[in-house]
Amino acid sequence: MMSPPETKPGKQPGVVLVTGGLGYLGSQLIRDLAAEPDFAGTTIRILDNLQNENYRALMNLPAGARYQFIEGDILDPAAVRLALREVEAVIHLAAIVRTPMSFERSAWVEQVNHWGTAHLVEACLEAGVAHLILASTTAVHGPGGPFRETDPCFPQGAYAQSKRQAEVAVLAAFERGLQTTILRFGLMYGLAPIVRFEAVPNRFAYLAGVGHPLTVFGTGEQRRSLIHIRDASQAVCLALRQPQLTSGHILNVIDQNSSVLELVEAIRQEKPEVVVRFTEQDIRTHLSFEVDNSAILALGWQPQVSVRVGLAEVVRQFQSLAPLAMQTLDFE
């Protein structure tokens, strides 16, 4: 097995802008950037509209780090221009990511995820930004796989389609001279200062933690591409640290492809008594979505958190809750 090529870190940016920096990945990333010796002295500027009221992500930031915060929206040109002043690198996380909303408000999802990115790209070119990192999703590939980054994309639904359109805008900017890196993340799970529970891994860990049954659609053999939140953050740090390795590339960023039943088994390692129920209700959840992560592994990135360990950490957050015997309750 060949080792990744020896490389020297590039010049580290003086100011890094993180859009959507108070979200799930952003809340972890802004702390990890401060902990990286390679980014000592870097100013971490955060642009977030606080739509989800994630004020807690701004609390107890690492001492000694240089942070700036702008409350603003990527759809607001004035806020974007202000945020880009003297910025050398942009990590673009801002997006609508909740899948139910992507079906109910598809036009708004496209406006934020596609056109918000397209306008940001133009602003980066005008401001002389050196490097733009886009957080995309493995969902752009569509069902099936495992897919490589060079395979055709068949995104299903407004969210995946809007993220693919965002990728196209970023790739066009690369042709115009902007260094760009596109990171396609799998389903994120695990603990961070801000945690989301919509996706299957964290949702199952939460349900098991509070003593509720897990509902599996179909056989449970359907597979998903997973990435622990800390591993996702480290992939961004790699791209920022060594743009000469990642610029111009699209990279699938996952720890592994796991079946739903394998997730259940990982949770049972921590919570053996969890109850599992099977249903045929939602045909959309029967599909598998898998990707290949060999490209980013070849660059030296390695996942550090196993699915079992990552899910166990979430389950333990609810361990103080006593089991609830629902059948004994009288609601009259």
Image (tube, grey):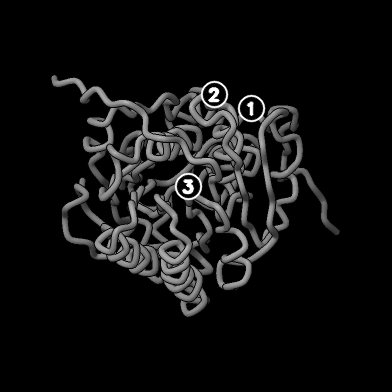
Q: Position of residue 163 (x, y in %)?
A: 38, 63
The structure residue drawn at horizontal position 38% and vertical position 28%, both measured from the top left corner, is: 303
Instruction: Name the secondary structure under disc 1.
Output: helix
Residue where numbered disc 2 is placed: 270
Q: Mark 3 to mark 1: distance in Å?
A: 17 Å
Instruction: Name the secondary structure under disc 2.
Output: helix
- Type of amino acid under label 1: Arg
- Type of amino acid under label 2: Glu
Count up the numbered dots.
Answer: 3
Q: Mark 3 to mark 2: distance in Å?
A: 17 Å
Q: Position of residue 235 (x, y in %)?
A: 40, 36
Q: Position of residue 203 (x, y in %)?
A: 55, 45
The structure residue drawn at horizontal position 72% and vertical position 44%, both measured from the top left corner, is: 58
The structure residue drawn at horizontal position 33% and vertical position 47%, both measured from the top left corner, is: 219
- Type of amino acid under label 3: Val
Residue where numbered disc 3 is placed: 200
User: Are circles 1 and 2 on residues that touch, CB within 8 Å?
Assistant: yes
Q: Earlier in the sequence, mark 3 or mark 2?
A: 3
Task: Pick the quarter of the image with the C terminus.
Answer: bottom right
Residue where numbered disc 1 is placed: 316
